[in-house]
Amino acid sequence: MAVIISGKEVSAKVRAEVKEACEQLKAKGVNPGLAVIIVGDDPASRVYVNNKKKACAEVGFLSEEYALPAETTQEELLELIDRLNKREDIDGILCQLPLPKHLDEKAVINAISPLKDVDAFHPSNVGKIMIGDYDFLPCTPAGVMEMIHFAGIEVSGKNCVVIGRSNIVGKPMAMLLLHENGTVTICHSRTKNLKEVCSAADILVAAVGKPKFVKADMVKEGAVVLDVGINRDENGKLCGDVDFAEVEPKAAYITPVPGGVGPMTIAMLMKNTLKAAQNRA
Ligand code: NDP
């Protein structure tokens, strides 16, 4: 039986800390503000944006939503970002991805001021993550690290395996584990001996985007298993990249889906916005 690390519990703790720090900032006359841009009507993006707004209200941030039509032009979007970059009362700017196909995501990410880039997607912030000298933590990987710390798990010297090498999850996840002295392997779709590599992991992070991809025979007895995936199973039910029913009896620690890494990502976004406001103060 594994210990279940609850993202609901850990994220509530992070949000409570942010709320307290926000009150202190407000007493000094600084009110943290987050602007969220959503283009088009993707239902998943709408859910994420609503959750972000709810989290802002809970911790006491000003939040502004810019819901733009799907046919918004690149120029219009960049113009809005430019205006928000110049606003004193907006500390964080987030453009919900993915964007409609005709918009250039890279140009949009580059247009957000690195000082307000609370998603930590701007190349300048990505570079800082690599160096280990960051203003903003990459939200999802930082959320995973927060869960590891909460559970009292030591990373130093551990064999860590990350499945997935995306810019927003896999790569920064590997960096954060490396910064804590883990011995890190990154796996991807061309990895030949995936089962062998994964079953040697003391700490296994799954960020694949495939429902129930990680089976019991890929996990070492007593491993720490962190599931970043958000997928739908064959019955349309929310599930992770890890086959929870199979893996849980074998693991020492595991994160569930839902109620695992998902809520952590938003809590870490709040933490980054607070950091931006503290920098302004
Ligand atoms: P991407 O699709 O960008 O990356 C998936 C990665 O998995 C790629 O590196 C890919 O390899 C690798 N992969 C795919 N198939 C295999 C395979 N058979 N064997 C080994 N590796 C494989 O996804 P993201 O990183 O954006 O997201 C991953 C998951 O995390 C998704 O379910 C997503 O919904 C979820 N997510 C959850 C968040 C949260 O808040 N909890 C936030 C962000 C994402 P290759 O590079 O070779 O193609």
Image: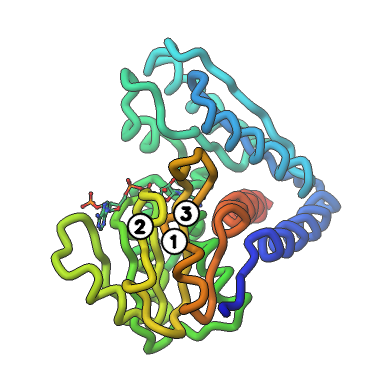
Q: CA distance from mark 1 to mark 2?
A: 6 Å
154 left or right, relative to 269: left
Amino acid, disc 2: Phe
- Residue 8: image quadrant is bottom right
Q: Disc 1 vs disc 2: Cβ atoms closer than 8 Å?
A: yes
Q: Nearer the viewer, residue 139 or 196?
A: 196
Q: Residue 178 placed where, x, y %? A: 36, 75
Label 1 residue near ligand 1, CB within 8 Å: no
Residue pointed to by mark 3:
240
Q: Position of residue 225 (x, y in %)?
A: 46, 71
Callout 1 touching callout 3 (CB < 8 Å): no
For the residue labelled by badge 3, is the local secondary structure a helix, a strand or a loop?
loop
**10 Å neighbourhood of mark 3: few (<14), some, or many (≥20)?**
many
Q: Report the disc number at residue 243.
A: 1
The answer to whether mark 2 is within 8 Å of ligand 1 is: yes
Q: Residue at x 54, y 83 (%)?
A: 153
Q: Amino acid at mark 1?
A: Asp
Which residue shows up at 49% across the image and 22% down it?
Answer: 39
Real-space Cα separation, disc 3 to disc 2, in angstroms: 8 Å
